[in-house]
Image: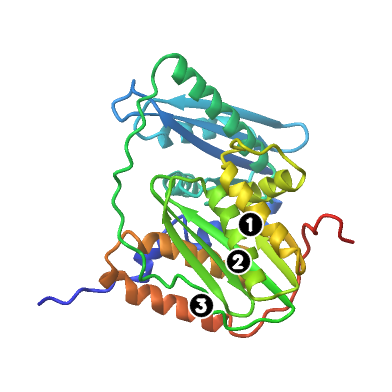
Amino acid sequence: MAQNKAVKLSTLMGKSSRTYQSRQVTDAMVAAPTHVAIAIWDISWKGTAHGKLYGWVIAVDAGPQKRFVRTGQTSAANPHPEAFAAFRAAIRGCPTPVWVVVGRRQAALGTRIRKAGFLVTGSFAEENRASKRASDMRKIHEVRAVRKSRKEGQQPQKRASTVEAQPTHWLPNRSRFSGSGHHVRIATDASSDTVSKGTMCFVANNGDYQLRTRMTTASTDELELETITLALKYARKQGFTRAIIESDSVGALEAIDHILEGGRAGKRWRGVSAGARSRFLQAWKDFHRQGQASIGRVMGHSGDPLNHAADRIAYLGLRASSHPEKESAPTVWAEVRDISRQLAKPAKQAGSGRAAPGSG
């Protein structure tokens, strides 16, 4: 009988958009006089052969006197050539060098721009002055396109979820519960293919971790919020009286602000379901019966070991679920053991964030 060959770690972790080299922010990027952020959106559209309509938002910040947005859309199967041409036209006359950020799933576009000689990171970065505007405008233009599609009868009926995925019960999916005490720092992260499955992972500075994989079409922001909820439940179960939870998800943190400020329940909020928000609020209240928790922002891919570990394990779980257990299990377990060893020494307790309502 032929022996199954183990999947290489490089195969599971990807070769482009998921590598830290393509997502790391450097001093040269931040110092660039022109910052650009490109956000790509897509919606279902029966009028195209491939069933989708693509669009883009290009935000440019070349200084106080030169800030603007360019938008466009295409029915082509690949939006990158047109988006790239629109980008080149938008930055004409802008001072160089130019730093460009693109979305996590836009590796091909990022590669095209990088080969043209520009500084590129493969996911949006807070340091990029154009990031927030591109992200905000993307949501607006996508909603407009959805409304237009409904008006013109372009949206097809929802397809039944028939996507098959490998069972993931064999993944290293539970915390080792190796230690407890008074204080804990926890990094959270989530990953999703936005089609059929997603993963949630938290890593604590005492070496504990938890990974969950589920069949879901939930947004990454919702999964990030669910991961924070898991971290709160873990901290309560372990008896911690002080928990510092850190996330690099702006969307999840904005959802938490909305929840703790008494935002309206019973409907979706920026793509986050009412159920996910309710579960977070309950976990938050439960923990504060025994201690204090703060939830704050950590810059993603900036070298923080806990954030790095949570991101890596979450994505590893997502990719591994697409491969047979016999091929990917040895690689996954070896990598998780290596990450655990690197986190064996307790990290320095640090951080600041949202304090419990009414706390000093």
Instruction: For label 3, count other residues whose C-alpha is less than 10 Å away and answer few (under 14), some (14-19) or many (20+).
Output: some
Quarter of the image with the N terminus in it: bottom left
The tag earlier along the polypeptide, 3 or 1, is: 1
Type of amino acid under label 1: Asp
Residue most toward the left? 1
Q: Which residue is mark 2?
A: 307
What's the coloring here?
Answer: rainbow
The CA distance from mark 3 to mark 1 is 19 Å
Q: Quadrant of residue 226?
A: bottom right
Residues marked 1 and 2 touching at CB (< 8 Å): yes
Type of amino acid under label 3: Ile
Residues 210 and 1: in front is 210
Q: Which residue is mark 3?
A: 339
Secondary element at image label 1: loop
Residues 259 and 27: in front is 259
Tell me if 249 is positioned left or right of 109 in this view: right
| Mark number, residue 248 | 1
